[in-house]
């Protein structure tokens, strides 16, 4: 039960970050992309290939921004998974060493809680780093 609450806690924090990035950064980049793409299409002397290449150039910053956000979130998820795996290994080792199941279960819960707390504490720094990178991309 505690593990489910922790998953929800992490998911809510990540959702909040994604919404904030979308509102403050991604949406502006989308607007610029559409304006740029419109300008490409309005170029009456351009060939179809030139218009297509122009539109691709317009889309590049947004694609780069989305890749950055995806990469950062995957890194967070990987770190959390590795930490949780460490906790599970530690619990298995304790069981193998003859520790009582209730003691191991508490030890596991404490370890996983620490993993979640430590990763949750990284979210503000990760968010700031992403916002800085997105701001520089949007220029």
Image: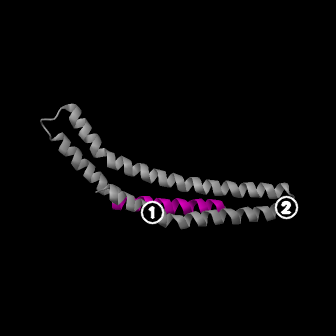
Q: In which quarter of the image is the C terminus?
A: bottom left
Residue at 36% of width from left, 57% of height from top? 134
Tell me which corner region of the image, top left, top right, bottom left or bottom right, holds residue 121.
bottom right
Percent coordinates x, y for residue 10 in the rendering: 55, 61
Q: Taking 128 as reference, is 79 above or below it?
A: above
Image quadrant where one finds the N terminus: bottom right
Label 2 element class: loop
The percent coordinates of residue 128 (x first, y second) are 43, 65
- Residue closer to the observer: 42 or 68: 68
Which mark is nearer the camera, 1 or 2? Answer: 1
Residue 99 tag number: 2
Span shown in magenta: 2-24
Give the quadrant of residue 101: bottom right
Residue 99: x %, y % from top left: 85, 61
Query: Is residue 97 magenta-colored?
Result: no
- Reading the image, the residue beneath label 1 is 127
Taking the spot 70% from the left edge, 66% from the top edge, the residue there is: 110
Residue 16 is at least partly visible in this image: no
Which mark is first along the chain, 2 or 1? Answer: 2
Residue at the location (15% across, 41% down)? 42
């Amino acid at each position: 039960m505690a593990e489910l609450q922790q998953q929800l806690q992490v998911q809510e924090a990540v959702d909040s970050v994604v919404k904030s990035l979308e509102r403050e950064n991604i949406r502006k980049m989308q607007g610029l992309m559409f304006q740029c793409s419109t300008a490409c299409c309005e170029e009456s002397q351009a060939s179809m290939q030139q218009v297509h290449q122009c539109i691709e150039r317009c889309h590049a910053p947004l694609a780069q921004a989305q890749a950055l956000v995806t990469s950062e979130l995957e890194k967070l998820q990987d770190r959390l998974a590795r930490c949780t795996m460490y906790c599970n290994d530690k619990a298995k080792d304790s069981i193998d060493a003859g520790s009582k199941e209730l003691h191991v279960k508490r030890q596991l819960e404490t370890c996983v809680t620490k993993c979640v707390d430590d990763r949750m504490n990284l979210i503000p720094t990760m968010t700031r780093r992403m916002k800085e990178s997105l701001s520089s991309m949007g220029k």
